[in-house]
């Protein structure tokens, strides 16, 4: 009984860790800085004949950000799915321990 209670508790803790792992780790979203983007509004850039080069750089930066966001979303979904499995396994183990306790106390 003690082993399944300990295993159930460990699985519940593991589920909690997997669910919050992606949220607790810091990640950078983009390699574009806000200073760089604000420079694109100055007179130097708006009167530039090759302004399309700046647009291409912005588009590439946005593509990287979108890919990164999709990857992080997929990681978060996998983490939540793992957490659900660990939670259910831990809950079952704790329920099994409580059932054994009820049987031992009843008889």
Image (cartoon, rainbow, N blue to C red):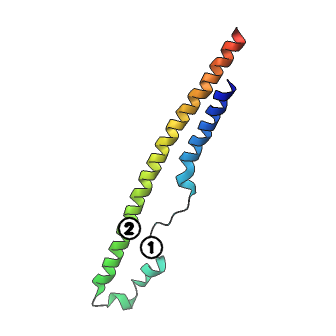
The front one of 23 and 51 is 23
Dot 2 falls on a residue whose secondary structure is helix
Where, by quadrant of the figure, is residue 72 drawn? bottom left
Q: Earlier in the sequence, mark 1 or mark 2?
A: 1
Q: Where does residue 46 sit, x and y in percent of width and height?
A: 33, 87
Q: Residue furthest right?
A: 105
Q: Where's residue 95, x and y in %?
A: 60, 24
Quarter of image, res 32: bottom left
Q: Helix, strand or loop at disc 1?
A: loop
Quarter holding the C terminus is top right
Q: Are marks 1 and 2 in contact (CB under 8 Å)?
A: yes
Question: Left or right: 19 with respect to 63?
Answer: right
How many residues crowd around disc 2 within 10 Å: few (fewer than 14), some, or many (20 or more)?
Answer: some
For residue 36, above or below residue 8: below
Name the residue rendered at 64%, 23% in the picture: 97
Q: Which mark is residue 64?
A: 2
* Residue 77 in the image: above or below residue 7: below
Mark 1 to mark 2 CA distance (whole Å):
8 Å
Q: Residue furthest top?
A: 107
Q: Residues within 10 Å of mark 1 (few under 14, many from 20)?
A: few
Q: Residue at x 58, y 55 (%)?
A: 24
Horizontal arrangement in the rendering, residue 25 relative to residue 105 (left or right): left
Image coords of residue 7 (percent x, y): 63, 33
x, y percent for residue 20 = 56, 49
Q: Residue furthest front?
A: 3
Residue occupying image coordinates x 40% and y 66%: 65
Examine the rendered structure and indicate whether residue 86 appears above or below residue 58.
above
- Left/right placement of residue 97 relative to residue 81 reads right
Residue 31 is tagged as 1
Kindly identify the residue that appears in the image at 30 percent across and 83 percent down: 53
The foreground one among 40 and 74 is 74
């Amino acid at each position: 009984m003690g082993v399944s209670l300990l295993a159930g508790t460990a699985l519940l803790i593991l589920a909690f860790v997997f669910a919050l792992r992606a949220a607790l780790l810091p990640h950078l979203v983009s390699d574009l800085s806000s200073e760089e983007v604000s420079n694109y509004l100055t007179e130097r850039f708006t009167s530039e004949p090759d302004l399309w080069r700046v647009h291409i750089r912005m588009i590439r930066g946005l593509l990287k950000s979108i890919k990164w966001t999709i990857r992080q979303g997929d990681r978060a979904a996998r983490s939540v799915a793992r957490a659900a499995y660990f939670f259910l396994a831990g809950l079952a183990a704790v329920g099994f321990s409580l059932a054994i306790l009820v049987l031992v106390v009843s008889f």
